[in-house]
Structures are given as structure tokens and as C-alpha cells.
Image (cartoon, helix red, strand yellow):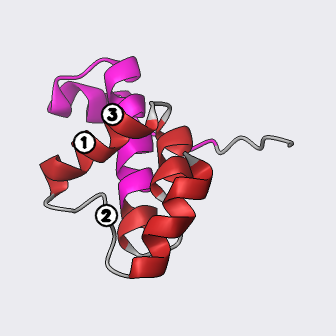
Amino acid sequence: MSTRTLTIPYPETLLLSLKESPETFEAEARLLLAVKLYELGKVSTGTAATLAGMSRVAFMFALGRFGLSPLGVEPGELAEDLTHA
């Protein structure tokens, strides 16, 4: 499977206003993108976890920070998640 890279420029002032290191900000941005794609039903927890750069279990726990369930909304989604586990 090939991998693509997304580059998003951001000003240094953003890091200063957030009081975060580049590594922390970039990890959080990846997580936020993965969470939103999962929330919209575009990807499974397994795919979102890979995008976020974390294990599936860690991603499932991280969903709680955003008030989301790792079990999805539809029964078929759970079966899809199990195939990616």
C-alpha cells in the first residue's frame, strides 16, 4: 500500500499562541483530522488510528475526549472495525 503525505503550512505564531511544540501541535492536528473523519463515518476506527499515528485501542480511548463512541452508530460499522482490527 502506498502512502501519501499532506503538508499544511502554519505560522510560528500559532505555536506561540497555543503554547505547544511543533510535535505536539502536529500530533494533535493528525488526531483531530482522524476523529472528524471517523465522526463523519468516512473511516473506521482502525483507519483513523493509523492516520492519527496511534494504536487502535489508544484511538478508541481518545474518542472519549470528543464525546464520541468507538462502537459507531450502525451495526455494520462494528463488523467493519473488527475486520481492520
Q: Mark 1, residues whose alpha carbon is within 10 Å: few (<14), some, or many (≥20)?
A: some
Q: CA distance from mark 3 to mark 2?
A: 14 Å
Q: Are marks 3 and 1 in contact (CB under 8 Å)?
A: yes
Q: Are marks 1 and 2 in contact (CB under 8 Å)?
A: no
Q: Residue drawn 47% across and 39% down?
A: 52
Give the answer, above or below, for where 34 lies relative to 75: above
**Is residue 17 magenta-colored?**
yes
Q: Mark 2, residues whose alpha carbon is within 10 Å: few (<14), some, or many (≥20)?
A: some
What residue would you read off at disc 3? Answer: 58
Res. 5 image quadrant? top right
Q: Residue drawn 55% across and 43% down?
A: 51
Q: Amino acid at mark 2?
A: Leu
What residue would you read off at disc 1? Answer: 62
For the N terminus, the quadrant is top right
Give the answer, above or below, for where 51 lies relative to 69: above
Give the answer, above or below, for where 79 lies relative to 70: below
Residue 56: image location, x then y, percent: 44, 39
